Amino acid sequence: MFRKFTALFFTITLAVLTFGSCAVPSDGDITDTTTGEQTTVGSGTDENLTLISDGKPLYTVIRPDNKEKNPLEVEAAVALSAAFHDACGRYIGITTDWTGNEISEYEICIGNLTRNGSVYTADVSNLGNNQFSVKVYDNRIVFLAPTSFGTSKAVDWFISEYLSKVTDGSMKELKIPANLDYTGSFDLPSTITVMTQNLLATDEEYAKFVAGGLEISVKLEDNTIEKRQPRVLSLIEKYQPDSLGVQECSAPWRTYFDSNLSKLGYKRIGASKNPKIGIIYNAKVLKPIFTGSFWLTEDPENLKISKEWGKESDGLTERLGMYVVFEVAATGERFAHFNTHLDTSKNNIIQTKQTEVLLNYIDKVTKEYGGIQAVLTGDFNYNMDSTAYGTLTGGRLGDTKSLAVLSSRGNGSFNKFKGPEYSSKPIDLIMTTSDGTVVESYEVIYDRFDGNNFASDHYAVLAKLGILK
């Protein structure tokens, strides 16, 4: 699957305005509109196509109709229109390849559209996953690659080649060769960066620490959820995980994430049985294929709390696991990200049983998808000398803390708002199926904010994985 070393992360500015106006559509698309002005499209010599004349774009961008299945093509269309605006001061119109939409001779086509095979025939079967094609068919310009990521790289190349040299809106004319036929290549991402973060669900939990007499140097009012929310977002922006498992993702956290993650190009998937755990992912790198969740009991599909394993240890009503099967947009390879939050160490028997449920689901899901690799993140609430940890690491799974070949920085992850000197035990883990996996690095993130404040009562943990398969 993924090779070792440097991962690629992609930032596309989502400018969303209509052609010839300044309205921002709510769905993130640029609407195809007309100005009422008469313009001769495609004017120029036989050797050139004219894309901009008198400061006005003459073409329309066509992107796939289904945004959910083709998110990178949609974002590439938006980025291309934004680049036209930067160059000539006007956004080029965008429409979809829905069969009910009118077909024009003067189009910029992004991705494998319904037009391909009837209006024009573009074949990229001879290209590798690290290649793309930009080609003119009569008056039509087509960006296409074997993967959606490659198509987005084709758009990036075109912007760099023809539009980025003028960014003050002063471009009056743009011509490209009428016989343009360019094949480009790019580096494929070779690692996946995974993070885990227990968020601390409520401010009341923090107050319990203080009431319990713990010596805490920070103030409650400086570490409320409202204060900590932008700190977690800044961690995501700084460390750029491809996927991030979160625990204690209460309603205030979910509301904040769903309002702010898109600014960074990320999305959140909550566990279907209870969204208090979730997986946040970089939508420019990963594409979710399937998601599921299960209770950590003897009847995982139906029973929230075990009736056979003993009394729940700390008053929490339920524990669960979830997973998302992801496809890497650049390569088409897949892996499963599991995320969980286990019972506390007061009941190691329940912890061991819950771990067995997790392992069973990891085995089941990875086999269903052809033996794909898996990563498991979470707050496990047990130490490396526990029976439950021995069960966790007794089969296919390995701890990235132990497997890291280049670096293994940091020790414990539970800070309890006291600091690294308190966090001697690594209860927040990132596990990976050890067959064929190289762990490039592992790190506990000891970042502080606004002086000496925290993102949570747990530190984030980060691992970079290169999977050789």
Image (cartoon, rainbow, N blue to C red):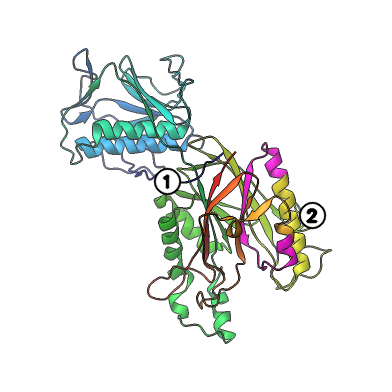
Q: Position of residue 283 (x, y in %)?
A: 47, 44
Q: How many marks?
A: 2
Query: Which image quadrant: the C terminus?
Result: top right
Q: Which residue is mark 2?
A: 299
Q: Position of residue 376 (x, y in %)?
A: 62, 54
Q: Position of residue 343 (x, y in %)?
A: 70, 67
Decide if residue 205 is on the left or right side of residue 355: left
Nearest to the observer: residue 165 or residue 41: 165
Nearest to the observer: residue 252 or residue 421: 421
Q: Are marks 1 and 2 in contact (CB under 8 Å)?
A: no
Residue at x 63%, y 49% (from the top left corner):
323
Q: Amino acid at mark 2?
A: Asp
Query: Which image quadrant: the N terminus?
Result: top right
Look at the numbered disc 2 and give the secondary structure of its residue.
loop
Q: Which residue is mark 1?
A: 9
Residue at x 20%, y 22% (from the top left corner):
39
Q: Amino acid at mark 1?
A: Phe
Instruction: Note whether 234 is above or below 102 in the view shown.
Output: below
Decide if residue 233 is on the left or right side of residue 209: left
Which region is colored magenta?
Answer: 364-390
Residue at x 37%, y 28% (from the top left corner):
184
Neighbor class of circle 1 (other Cα within 10 Å; few <14, some 14-19, many 20+) is: few
